[in-house]
Amino acid sequence: MLINELHSALPDLDIKERWPLAPLCTLHVGGEAEFFAAPDSIEDMRNLFAFVVREKIPFYILGGGSNVLFPDGLIKGIVISTQNLNSFEWRTNITADIDAGFKMPAIMKELREKNLAGLEFMAGIPGTLGGAVMGNAGAGGRGICELVDHVLVVEADGQLKLIDSHEFNFGYRKCSLADEKRIILNVRMTFRKAKHGDKEVLENYLLRRGSQPHGLHNAGCTFKNPEGYSAGKLLDEAGCKNLSFGDAVVSDVHANFILNKGGATADDIIKLIEICARKVFDKTGIKLEPEIKIFAPCSFMCSD
Ligand SMILES: Cc1cc2nc3c(=O)[nH]c(=O)nc-3n(C[C@H](O)[C@H](O)[C@H](O)COP(=O)(O)OP(=O)(O)OC[C@H]3O[C@@H](n4cnc5c(N)ncnc54)[C@H](O)[C@@H]3O)c2cc1C
């Protein structure tokens, strides 16, 4: 793929070459994207995506980078970031159309200012709205998709489509919107008026986060909880706390967090993930499934 082809097909788009990804990911690892673009309009996003799919260019969608792991070295293809899609428009006093690149903490702030509630369980979760909806992010048995009315997406053929919440399924850290090649552009959400007790619920969620590791780069929980089990407990009981590989280490506070001590590579983290998954499997026969989206070839024994 030549940069000239991209430039001549999409002359108005700022397309970067060899763009470092580590600063865009909360784990602070990963190499360089061969090409990188962050369109700031739905039309540009649509044109770019249609071109990329048509030309069979490998692509990766990047939101806030708080749940992804890119490989080291040069990543062939294009990384498409939603970071410049960030408008927020109230449609009624409780319903808003929010761009996919809008940051979760900023949404929480909007709700606080308007005395609205419904997303207490998202307190302290980083990243963008698009990333949250794609993985049905949440806590305490709740997930963000519960509050979604519809999503505006661009499909692989370049068509825009409104998908009503009745048309997709979601469950624990999964959403069927992710089953197809598409980019979430905008999400309509309905909240509710805050009532007595909501603030305490939110503070409780934040309090629970106090028991998670702080200070070192990470991407939240490494593995999903297998049904009926806590991944953190399984990892702890398999002796994973404090295990390390290179500059990647399993937190001694919460065994489901892998931390970058500063100089970790993506390879270090992948190796450590594999070691942890193997230890749990050897002890319990349970195959852990990564919660982090790993955009790198790896020989997982923890997923099929
Ligand atoms: C300290 C910490 C705590 C965390 N705690 C929690 C928690 O309690 N609960 C929880 O669920 N998660 C948690 N996470 C993980 C993460 O914050 C969430 O999964 C978040 O919603 C990911 O959003 P993002 O924008 O960063 O997505 P990214 O990491 O950028 O992307 C995640 C996936 O979504 C895709 N994607 C992103 N945006 C779009 C889009 N617009 N269209 C299509 N695909 C898209 C990407 O391709 C990728 O596959 C935590 C992370 C950290 C660092």
Image (cartoon, rainbow, N blue to C red):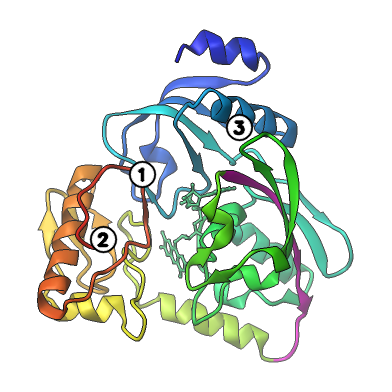
The x, y position of residue 74, in whole percent, is: 31, 27
Is residue 30 at least partly visible in the picture? yes
Q: Of the residues shown, which amino acid type is indicated by label 2?
A: Ile
Please identify the quarter of the rendering in which residue 225 is found.
bottom left
Number of numbered discs visible in the structure rendering:
3
Decide which of tag 1 and tag 2 comes sooner along the chain. Answer: 2
Residue located at (55% from left, 11% from top): 5
Q: Of the residues shown, which amino acid type is indicated by label 1?
A: Phe
Question: Horizontal placement of 227 versus 270: left or right?
Answer: right
Task: Classify mark 1: residues with Cα within 10 Å, few (<14), some (14-19) or many (20+).
Answer: few
The x, y position of residue 26, in whole percent, is: 39, 50
Quarter occupied by the C terminus: bottom left
Disc 1, SS: loop
**Mark pair 2, 3: CA separation:** 33 Å
Disc 3, SS: helix
- Is the C-beta separation of discs 2 and 3 under 8 Å? no
Disc 3 residue: CB within 8 Å of ligand 1: no
Disc 2, SS: strand
Task: Classify mark 3: residues with Cα within 10 Å, few (<14), some (14-19) or many (20+).
Answer: many
| Range of residues picked out in magenta | 182-196
Residue located at (60% from left, 53% from top): 130
For disc 1, the marked residue is 295
Q: Main secondary structure of the magenta part?
A: strand
Is residue 263 at least partly visible in the picture? no
**Mark pair 1, 3: CA separation:** 18 Å
Asked if 215 appears above or below 53 in the picture, the reply is: below
For disc 2, the marked residue is 258
Q: Which numbered disc covers residue 97?
A: none
For disc 3, the marked residue is 49
Is 190 contained in the magenta span? Answer: yes
**Mark pair 1, 2: CA separation:** 17 Å
Asked if 52 appears above or below 289 in the picture, the reply is: above
